[in-house]
Amino acid sequence: MGAGTVYRHFPTKELLFEAVVLDRMSALVDRMRSVAASEPGEAFFSALTAVVSKGMGDRDLVDALTRTAVTPGLTSANLELRTALGVLLVRGQEVGEVRGDVSIGVLMTLVRGVLLAAYSGSCEVAGALAVIGDGLRESGHR
C-alpha cells in the first residue's frame, strides 16, 4: 500500500495510531467476551493475564491503557475494555472465586501499575501477576 493511500485514510500520525490501538483493544474485548461463557473464575483470571500479556508486547496499547483519555475513540475503547473486564470480575465474585471487595477501579489500577513498572524495567511481570492473582482470589480458592 502506498503512502498516499495511508494518508487519505489517516491524515495524521495520531489518527493512524488511534486506529491501530482501537483495533488491538477491540480484539482484547472480543477475547474477553468469548471467554465469558467459560467458568467464571477461570475466565476472569485468563482475561486479566491476556490484558497484561498483550500490553507487554505493545507499547502503544500500554500508552492507551495508562493515559487518561486522549481522544474520544480511545476513551470509548477504554470504557469498553473496562466494562468487559468488569463483567468477568463480577461473575468471578458471584461464584466466590474472586474477592468481593475488589472494584474494577482497583483492578485497572493494578493492571496499569504492572504495565508501567514493566516498561520502566522495574517489574518482573510473571511474578507480579502471580502475586496479584493470589491477592485477588477469595481465600478459599488459593
Image: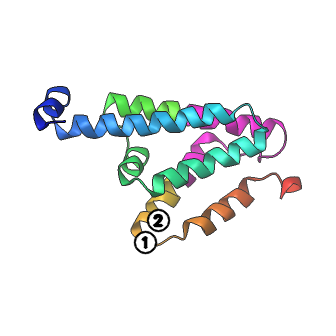
User: Dot 2: few (<14), some (14–19), or many (≥20) neighbours within 10 Å?
Assistant: some
The residues tagged by marks 2 and 1 sit, at their Cα atoms, a distance apart of 5 Å
Where's residue 69, x and y in %? Answer: 36, 37
Residue 76 seen in the current view: yes
Which scheme is used to colour this image of the protein? rainbow
Question: Which residues, given as a range, are shown in magenta?
Answer: 82-111
Position above or below: 118 against 18: below
Mark 2, secondary structure of its residue: helix
Where's residue 3, x and y in %? Answer: 12, 37
Position above or below: 18 against 107: above
- Name the residue that disc number 1 marks: 121
Q: Is residue 86 magenta?
A: yes
Residue type at the position of mark 2: Ala
Q: Is residue 16 magenta?
A: no
Residue in the foreground of this view, choosing between 45 and 37: 37
Q: Which mark is residue 118?
A: 2
